[in-house]
Image (cartoon, rainbow, N blue to C red):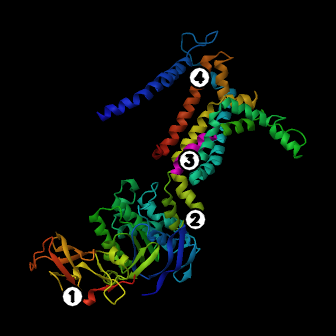
Amino acid sequence: MSVLRGRWLLAPGVFWLVAFFAIPVAVLAGTSLMPRGIYGGVTAGFTLEHYSRFLDPLYLGILARTLLLSAICTAICLLAGYPVALGIARSGRWKNLLLFLVILPLWTSFLVRTYAMIFLLRDHGLINETLMALGITSAPLHLLYTRGAVLAGLVYGLLPLMILPLYTSLEKLDPTLLEAAEVLGARPLSRFWRVILPLSLPGTIAGCLLVFIPSLGAFLTPDLLGGAKDMMIGSLIQNQFGPARDWPFGSAASVVVMVVVLVAMLGWLRRRPEVL
Amino acid sequence: MSEAVVELQSVTRRFGAVAAVNDVTLEVRRGEFLSLLGPSGCGKTTTLRIIAGLETPDAGSVRLLGGDATRRPAWERPISMVFQNGALFPHLDVARNVAFGLRERRRPAGEIRERVARTLELVRLDPALYAGRRITELSGGQQQRVALARALVLEPSILLLDEPLGALDLQLRKAMQLELKELNRRLGISFVFVTHDQEEALVMSDRIAVMDQGRIAQVGTPAQIYERPRTAFVAGFIGLCNIFGPAKGAGHRIAVRPERTQLHAGAGPAGSPAGEITDVVYLGGTIQVHLRLDDGARATVQLPTGGADQAWRIGERASLSWRGADAAVLED
């Protein structure tokens, strides 16, 4: 009876995932194997040409650049988010307020927040005006429409997703373990490396996935802050389904990204099965 | 043998307005088994944490092995500690838990392996069976053995134990009590053992320090504490005790153990406390007779069974007497 009950509890979530994830992914995979229709969409048939087209150095370069930028974004979020999460976990009665402040940006639309970045970064934006007013620079620095701007925007948008799981695993870390390490001879840095870091590994991995995967698929931030020079894979895919009207190629690119992410994750998790 | 390895001198530790440890002066001698005994909140654990270096005293000094250590960080003290719940590292297996302190001291791998195996054997865990186990695969008793091994492997001068047997069932607890006592004798390490269980303290300790409200109420051998309690608190906390109001002329109350109190039917000699029997409890080896004395106080007398000299009945009047040598004069 309890098994039956347990199964029924899964039903709503399973329905949602099948209806809005599994079926669309199957449609996507199917689309990627069919010839392109003239006005968008597909025609009947089977072809691998979209995948072979993706092997063009142009597209592989976009994929590589996207992977690199996402990895850097994840690393920055981790390095910036870890001390914050640790600080909040140890902030006693300020905990809830600080957590609220971390979540606060998520209350506004991502689009609005990205536009706000433009006001900060543009040639006559807040940063440049301030620098010039203080006499530190004489001409505006070119900040907007650079890779740095994309990175800054991604980090800003995704940082809370790193901090929250990190905080969760740091918060439940038993402080007695640190005292035990201390009495056993571990200095503060050693306690961090040998106790805090390994025990927060599940949160670290969850945070990295939550940052890495959305940054891989991001198209809004690269479009708005990066200009047209450095295309990221998210923008490429969005283009195929939008202006370019090449659904099969967009689908093929999506499938490639999905496979790359899945293979990387499985390989990583197989070496660390204990985190799951 | 009486050389002090730990000397606390007028140590005070406040949390807000409350002095958890209040002007405590205490010595731990080389090789001895000293228990800090008291009810929860009496300051015994805070005292232990001050010795460990996990708390810094607001006043007073801590000397370890003859040198001042008041401000010395925990990781530089010649001390190991066993925590209440074991505090084993869940991400490390048994051998790595035990090796934690040796790694911190950068000992060579061969030496670590050898010492870990030797120490696991010392706490009666077969290294071949347990070294690779995960902590979550161990029972509570096994976890405490690993915690003990993790502390002992460092060959500390002083081992602190914070109610390490608290979570174990009675049977295992009794066995571990004797094992700890044996380890203390065999290894020559000074043990400071925190407990709220008076029986445990009596069984294991060379000396007991009874604590009450942040202060040390009395320090002495189990026999001294049991037979010559200095305050009503000590008398009442360690076992049952009859406390009789000041006799005429004398200014102090006295304490007499139930098994040292004699019970007489009817009224006794003039001035001896008398009252009514309220309950008779058969305990197998002994009978406990509870009385409500005429002055309103309660008393208990413990008699051996099998004497059959007298059948005590509830509601009857009886009086009490004791030998002068069996009465402890209380200071408070």
The mark lying in front, picked from 2 and 3, is: 3
Label ID, residue B207: none
Q: What is the crowding at mark 3: few (fewer than 14 residues within 10 Å), some, or many (at least 20)?
A: many
Give the residue at mark 3: A167
Q: What element carries label 4?
A: helix
Q: What element carries label 3?
A: helix
Measured Cα–Cα span from mark 2 to mark 4: 52 Å
Question: Residue shown at 57%/47% (left/top)?
Answer: A96
Q: Is B134 rendered above or below residue B304?
A: above
The mark lying in front, picked from 4 and 1, is: 1
Chain name for mark 3: A
Give a yes or no on whether discs 2 and 3 share a subunit: yes
Give the residue at mark 2: A187
Residue A273: in magenta span: no
The mark lying in front, picked from 1 and 3, is: 1
Q: Is mark 1 on a helix, strand or loop?
A: loop
A86 to the left or right of B222? right
Measured Cα–Cα span from mark 4 to mark 3: 37 Å
Chain name for mark 2: A
Q: Nearer the viewer, residue B154 or B284?
A: B284
Q: Position of residue A45 (x, y in %)?
A: 54, 11
B141 to the left or right of A154? left
Measured Cα–Cα span from mark 4 to mark 1: 108 Å
Give the residue at mark 4: A252
Give a yes or no on whether discs 2 and 1 share a subunit: no
Give the residue at mark 1: B270
Q: Give the range drawn in magenta.
A: A158-171
Q: What is the crowding at mark 4: few (fewer than 14 residues within 10 Å), some, or many (at least 20)?
A: many
The mark lying in front, picked from 2 and 4, is: 2
